[in-house]
Amino acid sequence: MSRDVLFFDLDGTLIESSVGITRCVAYALEKMGQPVPAENELRRWIGPALRTSFAPVFGDRQQVEQAVELYRERFDSDGWKEHEIYPASARWCVR
C-alpha cells in the first residue's frame, strides 16, 4: 500500500525556536557545572547535533550523553513551548 507523506522543517522555517534551544543548552551546562556562555554564543549550538556540540565541552562520552539527557529533560517540559510562529507562516499552521 502506498501512502502520501509530507515532511517539513519547523525550525527556522515556520517557527523561531532559538529561545527553547538555547535555554535547554544553558540548562544542561548549568546542571553539569559548566559556565553558560552568552546568548550569542549559545546560538551557535542551533543546527549541529547535540553530541557534536557537547563533545568539545565534556570530551567524555558518558558526560556528553548526560548533557544530551539533561537538554531533553528540559526540552520535554518547557523547551518545546518556547517558540514563536513566524507571522508569514501563521496561515499555514493548524491551531
Image: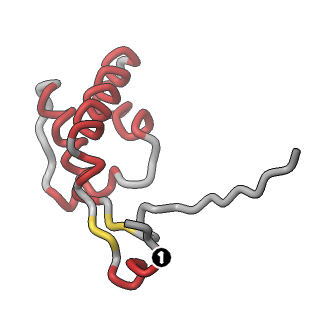
Give the residue type that dot 1 points to.
Trp
| Number of marks present in the image shown | 1
Residue 95: % across, % down: 37, 66
Q: Position of residue 50 (x, y in %)?
A: 40, 38
- Reply above or below: 24 against 17: above
Above or below, 47 against 51 in this view is below
Q: Position of residue 25 (x, y in %)?
A: 24, 42
- Residue 18 falls in image quadrant: bottom left
Pointer 1 residue: 92
Residue at screen point 33% across, 71% down: 85
Q: Residue at x 16, y 58 (%)?
A: 39
Under circle 1, the secondary element is: helix
Q: Residues within 10 Å of mark 1 (few under 14, many from 20)?
A: few
- Its colouring scheme is secondary structure
Left or right: residue 17 versus residue 78 is right
Tell me where residue 70 appears, x and y as whole percent: 26, 28
Task: Give me the residue at 33% from left, 82% from top.
Answer: 87
Picture quarter with the N terminus: top right
Q: Residue extending furthest top?
A: 62
Q: Nearer the viewer, residue 39 or 27?
A: 27
In the image as oriented, which residue stretches furthest toward the bottom? 88
Residue found at the very far right of the displayed protein: 1
Q: Nearer the viewer, residue 62 or 75?
A: 75
